[in-house]
Amino acid sequence: SNSSNIQLLGLFDRLSNRSESSEFSVQSRAIFKSAVLLSQQYNMKIEGQSIEWQSAETNGNIIDALSKTCHALSYSNIVGIVGPGLSREAHLVADFGKTIGIPVISYSVTDPDLSNRNVYRNFYRTVPSDNSTALAIVKLFVRFNWTSCIVIYQND
């Protein structure tokens, strides 16, 4: 890859369609690629350059997430990070993004601690934190005078 081209780095738990691969991770990567391709189709530019992309597989491992981020930054002109998808990875990657001055935008991280703008100034998310979700659920209960619920949980 040409290191002078502007790139976004996408961090995903799994990249391939292997049987153990998370369907959500594969879909998230496809949406990431589609967004970059649309930016090219609509001739969107950063500093006069088209946006390109690369992605890395973190395997749900904090050190892999940081290592692959450092590797991409060493060899490419990365201007932003999309991901990671797991809160345990996001703490370190967000802190690293703050240190080097690039934004980190997660597509699925919900840990409320990452909402602390004093600590994670360069971290953004596209989904609400667990605190926001819990508050919305409480408001539903109050609004409809509910006093109980049934929790259905799926772990796959």
Image: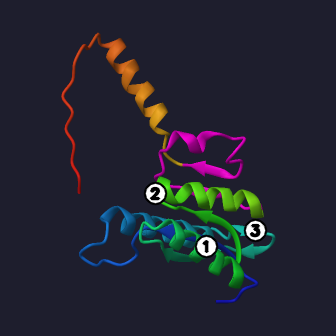
Quadrant for residue 98, please give it.
bottom right
- Mark on residue 46? 3
State which region is magenta. Answer: 101-125
Report which residue position mark 2 lands on.
Answer: 86
Residue positioned most to the bottom? 1
Label the magenta part by its dominant secondary structure. loop
CA–CA distance between discs 1 and 3?
A: 21 Å
- Which residue extends farthest top? 145
Comparing 24 with 47, the one in front is 24
Residue 71: x %, y % from top left: 63, 81
Give left or right: position of 110 versus 54.
Answer: left
Residue denoted by label 1: 69
Measuring 51% from the left and 61% from the top, which residue is drawn there? 84
Measure the C-alpha gap from mark 2 to mark 1: 15 Å
Badge nearest the viewer, 3 or 2:
2
Q: Badges 3 and 2: C-beta atoms under 8 Å apart?
A: no
Q: Position of residue 132 (x, y in %)?
A: 48, 32
**Residue at the image position 45 percent from the left and 69 percent from the top:** 29
Residue displayed at 63% across by 56% down: 94
Here the colouring is: rainbow
Residue type at tag 2:
Leu
Determine the image quadrant of residue 52.
bottom right
Instruction: Tell me the distance, in whole angstroms, between the alpha carbons under discs 3 and 2.
Output: 28 Å
Magenta-drawn stretch contains 96: no
- Residue 87 marker: none
Viewer-proximal residue, 58 or 79? 58
Considering only order in the chain, which callout, 1 or 2, is on the residue closer to the N terminus? 1
Residue at 22% in and 42% down: 153
